[in-house]
Amino acid sequence: MKDILPLFIGGLVLFLYAISQLSEVLKSIFSERTKGIIARYTTNIFSSIIIGTLVTIILDSSSAVIILVIVFINAHTLTFRQAIGLIMGANIGTTFSSQIIALDVGKYSVIPLAIGLIFEIFVRQERLKRVGHVLLYLGMLFFGLFIIEQSVVPLRDSEVFMEWIRKIDNSPLQGALIGGFITLIIQSSSGTVGMAIVLGKQQIITVAGGIAVMLGAELGTCSDTLLATIKSNRQAFKAGLFHLIFNLITIILGLLLFQPFVDWVQYLSVDQGIGNQIANAHMLFNVLGVICFLPFVRPMEKILNLVVPDRKNSS
C-alpha cells in the first residue's frame, strides 16, 4: 500500500490539475462566443438542453458551465428559465468525458503531450499557443489516468481493500455516500466517476459498486454550484437550488430502482468491460433523468419562483 499511494495521488493530482487547466483554457477561448450562443439559442427548454450539453462537452466540465450560467444570470444575460435547460444539458454533457475515460487512451497520452510541448516552446502566435495548451492538458489528463490505472493494479491482492470494496458493492447507499464525499474533497465529479471507471477496468470494483459511486458524485458536484450562488441575485440562487433539487430527486430514484437499473445497463452493455459499463450507466442515468424530469420543469419553476420570489428592485 505504501508503494501504491504516492503513485495514485500523483496520478490523481495530475488528472485533476489537467481538468482544471483545460477547462480554464477552453473557457478563455470560447467564453465570449459561448455567451452569445447561450443568450441567442436558449429560447425554449429543448434548445437550452442541447446548448448546455454541447457547451459542457466543449468545456469538459459541468461545474464550469453551471458556474458560467450563474455568472451570466448575475450579469442579466440569462434568466432563471433559460438556466434550467442549460443545467439539465450540462448533466448530459459531462457524461462525454466518462466515455473518453473508459477508452484505453492512457497509452497514447505521449502524443498530445509532445505536440503540446512543441507548441509551447516554438509557437509564438497566441491562438496557436492556446491550441498547444489544450493538447498539453489533454495529454496530462490521459497520462494522469494511465498512472492511476497502473497504481491500483496491486490492490486486487489486498484483502483489506477488497473487503472494503465489497461493502460498496453490497450497499448502494454506502457507495453513493462515499462517491459524494470524494467529490466534495476533490471538487470534481468527473474525477470521482473516472476513478470508479479505472477501478472497474482493473476489475477491482463491480458495475453495481461503480454505479453507486457515480450516483454520489452527481450530488457532490452541487457543492461548488451552491458556493457560486453566494452573494448572487435571486435568479442565480434559484438556478443553484434547481441544480441541487434536480440531482437529488434523480439520485433518490436511482437508488430506489438501483438493481433494475444495474441489470438494464449490463443487458445493454453486453460484451463490454466493467469500465465501459460504468461509463454507459453514467450516460444513461443522466439522459433518463433529464427525460423523466422534463414534464415537471414548469411546476418546479413555479414552486421555486413562489418560494424564492424576485425582489422588485433587484439588480
Image: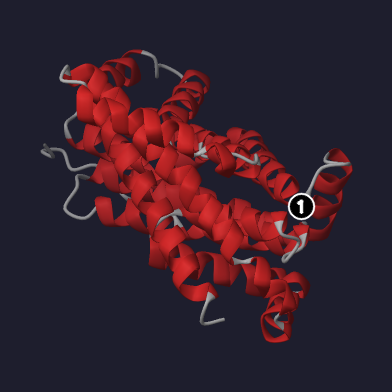
> Helix, strand, or loop for circle 1?
helix
Q: Nearer the viewer, residue 160 or 227?
A: 160
Residue 179 % position (x, y): 55, 65
Residue placed furthest toward the bottom: 160
In this rendering, is residue 223 above or below 313?
Answer: below
Residue 272: percent from left, percent from top:
82, 42
Up-down relation of residue 218 to residue 305 (above or below): below
Tell me: 171 left or right of 178: right
Query: What colour scheme does the image use?
Result: secondary structure
Q: Is residue 26 visible?
A: no
**Left or right, 75 with reference to 222:** left
**157 or 235: which is nearer to us?**
157
User: How many callouts does the rendering have?
Assistant: 1
- Residue 203 at x, y percent in the picture: 76, 61
Name the residue at 34% across, 38% down: 22
Q: Quadrant of residue 120?
A: top left
Left or right, 266 with reference to 202: right
Q: Quadrant of the N terminus?
A: bottom right
Give the residue type at disc 1: Ile
Quarter of the image with the C terminus in it? top left
Q: What residue is rendered at 60% in x and 60% in y?
A: 150
257 or 166, which is in the foreground?
166
Q: Could you say where residue 2 lies in the image, as x and y percent from the top left?
A: 51, 82
> Where is 18 relative to 129, above or below?
below
Q: Is residue 216 visible?
A: yes
- Report crowding for label 1: few under 14, some 14 to 19, many 20 or more residues within 10 A (C-alpha): many
Question: Circle 1 sits on which residue?
Answer: 274
Report the residue at 56% width, 44% height from top. Answer: 106
